[in-house]
Image (cartoon, rainbow, N blue to C red):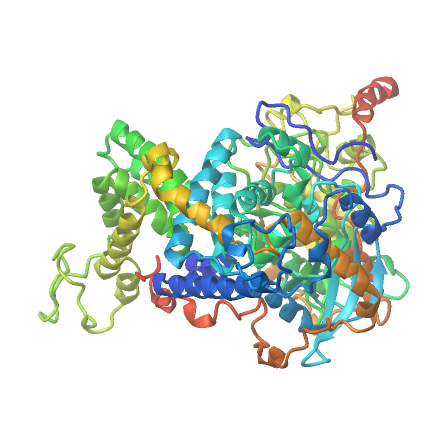
Amino acid sequence: MAVSPLVAPATSSPFKRQPSAVPSSNGNGTPRLLQNSNNNNSNNNNRPAPNSNNTLPMTLDPIEQLNEDEKRKYVKGKKLGEGTYANVYLGHARHDPSVLVAIKKIKVQQQYQDGMAPDAVRELKYLRELHHPNIISLVSVFSSKDQNLNLVLEYLPLGDLEMLIRDVDRVRYGAGDIKAWMGMLARAVWFCHDNFVLHRDIKPNNLLIAADGEVKLADFGLARAFADPGRRMTANVITRWYRPPELLFGARHYSGAVDVWSVGMVFAELIIRAPFLAGNTEVEQIALICKQIGTPTEDNWPGVTQLREYTVPTDVVAVWGKEAYMGRFGAVGADGVDLLVKTVALDPKKRITAREMLEHRWWRTDPKPTRKEDLPRKSSGGEEKMAADLKRRPGIVEEEARGAKVARKLDFGQSK
Amino acid sequence: MATEDARYRQSSQYQLWSFSPTRLAAMRDKTNAAARARIAERLSSLPALSNNTSAPTSSANTPNADGSSTPALPEFLTPPEEAQLVTFFTSELLRAGDHAEMSDDIKATAAAFFRRFYVTNSIMTYPPQEMLFVALFFGCKAEGTFVSIAEFGKTFDREHPEDILAGEFLLCQGLRFAIDVKHPFRALRGATMELATLPDIDRNRLAAAEHRAREVLRFSPLITDAYFHYTPSQIMLAALSLADRGLTERLMTQTFHHVAPPPDNSGADTPASSGPDGPAPATKRGPPRGSEDKAQIIGPHIRDQVLGTIEACRNLLARELPERREHWSDRAVLKAQVTPLRKKLSKCRDPDRWNLVELQRVRREQAAKRADSEEADPAPPGAAAANNTAAGDGTVFGDALAPREVKRRRVLDDPFGGPL
């Protein structure tokens, strides 16, 4: 936890041409007791304070009044979830109690001493601009008195895709349902990319479900705009099981293809109802990709061996063809498998794009996608799941120490 | 969802931060008047001899000779004076950004933040010298560069860099939490690449034009109101036009290349080759045909309209060409034009708002006091004004300061947005 959440800039200027930093490893770190007001007060008390001012009532400026008005449009209800990063409340519009919202109150983070935290900045920046039926909508923003950011989000009471995938006993679904969910996911991702935004954390529990069955892509805490050519980005994004090989190999220049890989992983998971490639470490993750999809080599992916962290198990597995997937993933038909295989092309340049996904023939072949109101759903637990998803710290489940990456090489060296 | 224009109209830059010049001036007048009223009120409610660190100790505030505790009110800045100072401090902001070798995007975003903030907040209320650093710091973050405040402070030799953080939330609020700013830099690259595909373009000329246009984009639109009045592509074309008018017109002719089909009908139609000085035809053209749509999008009528907009933007940018950087740091100019205003400012600033660190402390203290009651009832005491119901329900991001009418409706039928 002592590590700075920032990638220490190495160049002369800290502002120039830096890849965006990523919040550090507190995703599963030790929980902390937050004592905001106490700490803040003690921090600031060492400054000379003009006494006369303290007793004067602070009137509101127009800017503050505007915020108050915004805040007053919503009534904050019961707390649905509490996390180190954010608390989630149920809320409703003051003028109409039947209009429900989820209020995500982002906490002042004790481990980030530099003002508003990166994930909050990113989430605010992108959600504020992206308006699409398959992207969670940011209804409003206001600040509470203690200067915490409150994001008013649409209320999504039916939980998330993960919940449906996991409940094998009670939730049954078929190819038409998968097609409907995947269609909504593909549209969301296409829209992000078409607006030059990379999501960088697509996974089933970031796919929430609205009351009418619509799937909504949420959690933009790791999102960023497409970088200008030549500008480096961090490779340390996307939850491991959904992370593409180029990021596992440490690529610093990448594209929407990273999200497409994640879409492929979600697709596979929807079919087999378990995470497709669930590595416990990055090393394992790469090994699983090599085994199940094929070993990235110069032949199937020119240039891959130049990536900084490129290391693969010594016994090379040839890239599996479509037929190999039919047994396990055949439930979505040959066309569905064709789409799946294209999303998990090892070479990101050969991977299908979000737009091409939408043009794929699978959507037009039988069975038709299920109408959203007829999609399988769970009758309970959705609200809690939504709260759990919204309060979670974005992105990284863990961040491996540099040592672990070195160890990877040894590991492979010894195993064969 | 189809067109880029429809997309742009959904952006916060368009919805919240685009105004006609008249509208913008009216908002600034309103901000100025409101600040005067509040500051006057606050100054006169100050205890006579309060040795307030944040209040100016000037002759204006000393008690009258007869010992009465009513201080004379200072002379306030006028709206044009405020605008002049905002421009000066924007140039300071850009200088600071250059000093720190920040990227173009960061500097441009920070400048836009700074100018947006001072549309609805008076420079007499919140200290510009502080806010420019806040804008730079938050601009870094908004552009995805997360630098520590300690490091940031070091770059600018700040003794208490944490003070900058005290203004961050305030800035964010002033921006109405819209922190995505769209810039013309990439558009310029695109336009250059497009021009490069034309057969008879002199490469050296093109390179020189791009270079000069970039220089312009790095300064002129940022220090003027261009971002409030024009779209990024309009600003880009205006900058390119300042650099090389011929190339820009070439690009426009190339883009709006639709020519009315051969005159096998309606001789009433005059071919729109009248050139830029001929007024755009006011009447609708002949019978609706297959090419009608095309004419609407890439026809000569639209071209002339766009050219008019670009010309207007060009004139705005021409007031602050990059050479004016020196102007804003020239000693003689400062002495004559800026120093007097800063002196005036130091006498009329808001005693309650000037010290951001203190302001944040007080705010947090109030929050702590209210914390309990707030859990029970979110209505803040005193804020339950009757006019709350007046707030439009559909207007999600608040409307009070920027009513909907300000949006430029004429853009709707124009791919690049109409002239204002």
Q: Residue at x 73, y 47 (%)?
A: A265
Q: Position of residue A257 (x, y in %)?
A: 61, 42
Direction from residue B256 to residue B44 in the image, left or right = right
Instruction: Decide which of A338, A238 is in the foreground and name it.
Output: A238
Q: Residue furthest front?
A: B66
The relative height of residue A51 versus residue A313 in the rendered view (above or below) is below
The relative height of residue B213 versus residue B83 in the rendered view (above or below) is above
Q: Quadrant of residue A413?
A: top right
Q: Quadrant of residue A89?
A: bottom right
Q: Position of residue B271 (x, y in %)?
A: 12, 61
Q: Residue at x 28, y 48 (%)?
A: B314
Direction from residue A19 to residue A240 in the image, left or right = right
Direction from residue B185 to residue A187 in the image, left or right = right
Q: Position of residue B220 (x, y in %)?
A: 36, 43
Quadrant into which the C terminus of chain A falls = top right
Q: Quadrant of residue A83?
A: bottom right
